[in-house]
Image: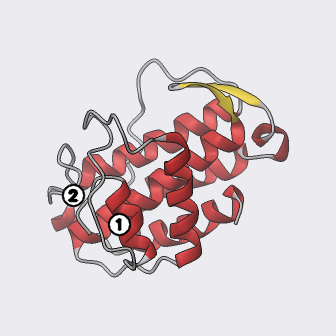
């Protein structure tokens, strides 16, 4: 699986979750201790737009727009479309300045896609929605995180310590456990 295919599959999953939201979900807590549902979606949309801008060699906006002004589903649709449009073959094969440093476009696109997939799990858990992720996609996201976020030396600021799971745990459980979540 490549990052483009992973993004397409992740977008389908997240779009389904966004379409299942109700106003009552807005303030619900998520497995991310620092965010409720609204804040988590805001983070996802902001991250998508920031990486899309970086892939197009644009500077981040001085003030972050309210991407959720027209609702979470529309905010997500805009972020996903911006990422899709920015992830051209040239952009993915070139280095770009991102908020976390200069990296190849493919790495930045992979990181945001893996981030969105893990947050899809957070969103599904918080809102009691079904989540269907293929083992291939979960394995791809886990491999992405294993390359960019080592298991050792985590401070809890972004990634908590890896949660132990059985060797035969499912791919999604292994993914979320690696990112410090209790499956």
Marks 2,1: beta carbons within 8 A = yes
Q: Residue at x 70, y 38 (%)?
A: 105
Q: Position of residue 1 (x, y in %)?
A: 70, 66
What is the spatial separation of the Cα atoms under label 2 and label 1, in whole angstroms? 9 Å
Q: Position of residue 110 (x, y in %)?
A: 60, 49
Question: Which quadrant of the structure image shows residue 109?
Answer: top right
Q: Nearer the viewer, residue 101 or 156?
A: 156
* SS of the residue under disc 2: loop
Query: Which label sits on residue 31?
Result: 2
Does 173 sit above or below residue 58? Answer: below
Neighbor class of circle 2 (other Cα within 10 Å; few <14, some 14-19, many 20+) is many
Q: Residue at x 35, y 66 (%)?
A: 121
| Residue 174 placement, left or right of 58 | left
| Residue 8 appears in the picture as rendered | yes
Question: Which quadrant of the structure image shows residue 27?
Answer: bottom left
Does 176 sit above or below residue 168? Answer: above
Q: Position of residue 22 (x, y in %)?
A: 25, 70
Does 148 sit above or below residue 57? Answer: below
User: What residue is shown with label 1?
Assistant: 121
């Amino acid at each position: 699986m490549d990052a483009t295919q992973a993004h397409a599959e992740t977008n389908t999953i997240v779009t389904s979750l966004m379409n299942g939201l109700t106003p009552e979900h807005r303030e619900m807590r998520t497995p991310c201790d620092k965010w409720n549902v609204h804040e988590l979606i805001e983070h996802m949309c902001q991250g998508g737009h920031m990486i899309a801008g970086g892939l197009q060699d644009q500077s981040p906006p001085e003030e972050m727009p309210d991407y959720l002004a027209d609702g979470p589903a529309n905010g997500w649709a805009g972020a996903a479309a911006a990422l899709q449009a920015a992830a051209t073959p040239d952009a993915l094969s070139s280095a770009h300045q991102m908020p976390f440093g200069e990296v190849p476009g493919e790495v930045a696109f992979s990181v945001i896609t893996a981030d969105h997939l893990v947050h899809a799990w957070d969103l599904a858990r918080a809102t009691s929605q079904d989540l269907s992720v293929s083992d291939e996609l979960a394995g791809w996201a886990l491999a992405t995180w294993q390359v960019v976020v080592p298991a050792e030396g985590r401070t809890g600021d972004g990634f908590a310590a890896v949660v132990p799971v059985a060797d035969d745990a499912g791919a999604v459980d292994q993914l979320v456990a690696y990112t410090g979540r209790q499956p």
